[in-house]
Image: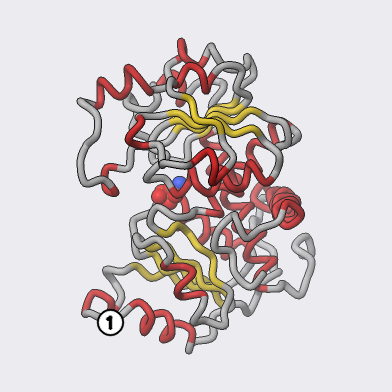
Amino acid sequence: QKDILDMASLSAEEITHILDTAQGMKEISLRPVKKVPTLRGKTLILFFHEASTRTKTSFDIAGKRLSADVIALAKSGSSMAKGESLLDTVKTLEAMHPDVVVMRHGTSGAAQYIAGHLKSPVINAGDGKHAHPTQALLDMMTIRERKGRLAGLKVAIIGDIAHSRVARSNMEGLIRMGAEVRVAGPPTMIPKGVEEVYGVKVFSAVEGALEGADVVMMLRIQKERMENILFASEREYARTFGLSTGRLALAHPDALVLHPGPMNRGVEITDEVADGHHSVILDQVENGVALRMALFYLLAGGMRHADED
Ligand code: CP
């Protein structure tokens, strides 16, 4: 693979190899000196055209832990603010010989578009409503680490499926790895044909999707990608679709609760659940660094083994 653009283009073997590599990388972050020389002399460009806390920071830290030179550029600080096109911008960046370009963009298909014009590997850090493959991979790493497998697990993805690139990438990845994926949310936020396209089960009520679930993945309502607010109020949303301790009791007693962040506390998830013992939300963040280290290592072709000092 030259690029990591979506989960649909990764085979089960490739996903397993990425997760295994990421698991090996995790130990580096626990050392007193959190740095190995694996990607010394490599240049990584992070181009974030949309806001990000977790993804941008973890790509930045991942590159630095592998000793690469990391250059981060935002839309507001680039000449795109003066009207330069996306293609001219990325071709300009490529003329500086980066080894990997990471891009987040608000338009679905933006990462695919630039990957088609660049020789450098491109990692999609989220494009519109389309895909967020590194989030799905770190979610799968977190689930596999806790449950020991992905195949056969019942995973409930609850909330605004229609506007969520995280949901799309997780549906593709988890089904590919043999999980049973259930989705539930407001009918206006469930894409038409999702059962046929992804092979997931749609539940009209959250309670049905939660019944016996091994993993519960809650999603944020993506107000920035909606033309209209499609429910009466946040309080009404929380009452009907939010994950409370009472509702979580329907899931398996050892169920994991995931959320890609940022959370709307009190809307899709209560404080008690977000901070409770089922929650692995901060494990997701921790694994995000290791997972992105693995992708840089695999795509930028480190000359040394990652463990070598
Ligand atoms: N999960 C995620 O993409 O978070 P950020 O928008 O903070 O990067």
Q: Is residue 305 above or below residue 288?
A: below
Report the side of 59 relative to 85 (left or right): right
Q: Residue at x 50, y 67 (%)?
A: 102
Q: Is residue 271 visible?
A: yes
82 sits to left or right of 189: left
Q: Quarter-wise, where is residue 261 in the image?
A: top left
User: What is the x, y in percent for residue 295?
Assistant: 64, 62
Q: Residue at x 41, y 41 (%)?
A: 191
Q: Residues within 10 Å of mark 1 (few under 14, many from 20)?
A: few
Q: Is residue 202 above or below residue 164?
A: above
Colouring method of the image: secondary structure
- Point out the residue furthest to the bottom here: 95
Question: Which residue occupies the foreground of this view, 132 or 108?
Answer: 108
Where the C terminus falls, by quadrant?
bottom right
Residue 256, relative to residue 53: is it above or below? above
Is 80 on the left-hand or right-hand side of 249?
left
The residue positioned 54% from the left and 42% from the top of the image is: 196
- Residue that badge 1 annotates: 84
Residue 228 picture quarter: top left
Q: In the rendered picture of this protein, how many numbered marks are placed on residues?
A: 1
In percent of width and height, residue 110 lies at 41, 68
Q: Position of residue 244 (x, y in %)?
A: 42, 17
Q: Where 190 falls versus 60 (above or below)? A: above
Specify the amino acid type for callout 1: Glu
Residue closest to the eye, 66 or 110 = 110
Question: Can residue 286 be spotted in the picture?
Answer: no
Instruction: Tell me if the residue at label 1 has its CB under 8 Å from ligand 1.
Output: no
Where in the figure is residue 283, as x and y percent of width and height?
58, 37
Picture quarter with the N terminus: bottom right
Residue positioned 57% across, 79% down in the render: 120
Q: Secondary structure at mark 1?
A: loop
